[in-house]
Amino acid sequence: MKRKGILVVVSGFSGAGKGTLMEQLLKTYDNYSLSISMTTRAPRPKEREGREYFFVTKESFEKEIKQDGLIEYATYCENYYGTPRKYVEEQLNRGKDIILEIEIQGALKIKEKFPTALLLFVMPPSAKELEKRLTKRGTETPEVIEKRLRRAVEEAQGIEKYDFIIVNDDLESCTRRLHNLITAAHNAPIRNEEFIENMRQELNALVKGEK
C-alpha cells in the first residue's frame, strides 16, 4: 500500500516557538516538507523571500484569492496570511507529510476542506513564559506585544477544536513528541479507508471461497 502524505496543521500563540520547532523537525527527520505561506506583512530581520514566507502586496494577495490559488487564508494583526494550493497538493501526492504553520482561523478552514488533516496546537508552559518569549524576541514594540497577547486570549477559546496540544517546554523532547504524533496518525482509520475496504473485500472473498 502506497503511503500517502498527511496534511499537518501546526498553530499556536505567537511566541510559543512554532517556527523553531518546525525548523528542528525538518532538521531531525527527512519525510517532512514545510509549506511556505504567503503574507502581506513586512519581513522581519533575517527573513528571506521564499524561505520563511512569500512576501507580497495586498493587491497581489487578493488576486490569488480570486483565482482560487490558496487553500486557506486569514487576517492576523491587519495582515493577510495564506497557503498556496499547488505546492501542498504536489507534496501530498509524493507521499510527503506537509506541515502548515498557520493561524487558528486558517487551520479550521483547512479542517473543513481536508477532514483528514491533523491539527496540532503548540503552547508555552505558562502565560508568563509566553510574555517573556515575546519580549526576548526583540522584534516588536510593546504595543505589538500587547496586541499578540490579546490575540492569544482569543485563540485560547478555540484550542479544543485541535487534535492534540504540544507544550513546548524543551525543544528536543517537543520535536520528538511532534514526530511521534504524526507517525501514529498515519495508522488512524480515517486515513486508511481504502486499505480497510480492500481488506474487507479480501476477507469476504476468502470466506466465500471456503464454502
Image (cartoon, rainbow, N blue to C red):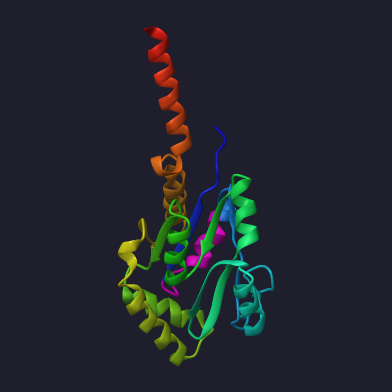
Q: Is residue 167 left or right of residue 97?
A: left
Q: Is residue 153 left or right of residue 143?
A: left
Does residue 46 sit above or below 169 in this rendering?
A: below
The location of residue 211, given as percent across then percent down, is 36, 7
Residue at far right of view: 49
> Does the stretch in magenta take in 52?
no
Depth check: 36 or 178 in front? 36
The location of residue 111, given as percent across then percent down, is 43, 59
Quarter of the figure that contains the N terminus? top right
Identify the residue shown where x is 45% and y is 43%. Answer: 191
Identify the residue shown where x is 59% and y is 74%. Answer: 65
Q: Main secondary structure of the magenta part?
A: helix
Does residue 130 sit above or below 186 in this rendering?
A: below
> Does the stretch in magenta take in 24?
yes
Identify the residue shown where x is 60% and y is 81%. Answer: 40
The location of residue 43, given as percent across then percent down, is 63, 80
Q: Is residue 50 left or right of residue 127?
A: right
Quadrant hosting residue 146: bottom left
Residue at far top of view: 211
The location of residue 177, given as percent across then percent down, is 41, 51
Q: Which residues are magenta?
A: 13-25
Quadrant hosting residue 2: top right
Q: Is residue 60 left or right of residue 104?
A: right
Q: How many marks?
A: 0
Identify the residue shown where x is 47% and y is 62%. Answer: 110
Depth check: 165 or 191 in front? 191
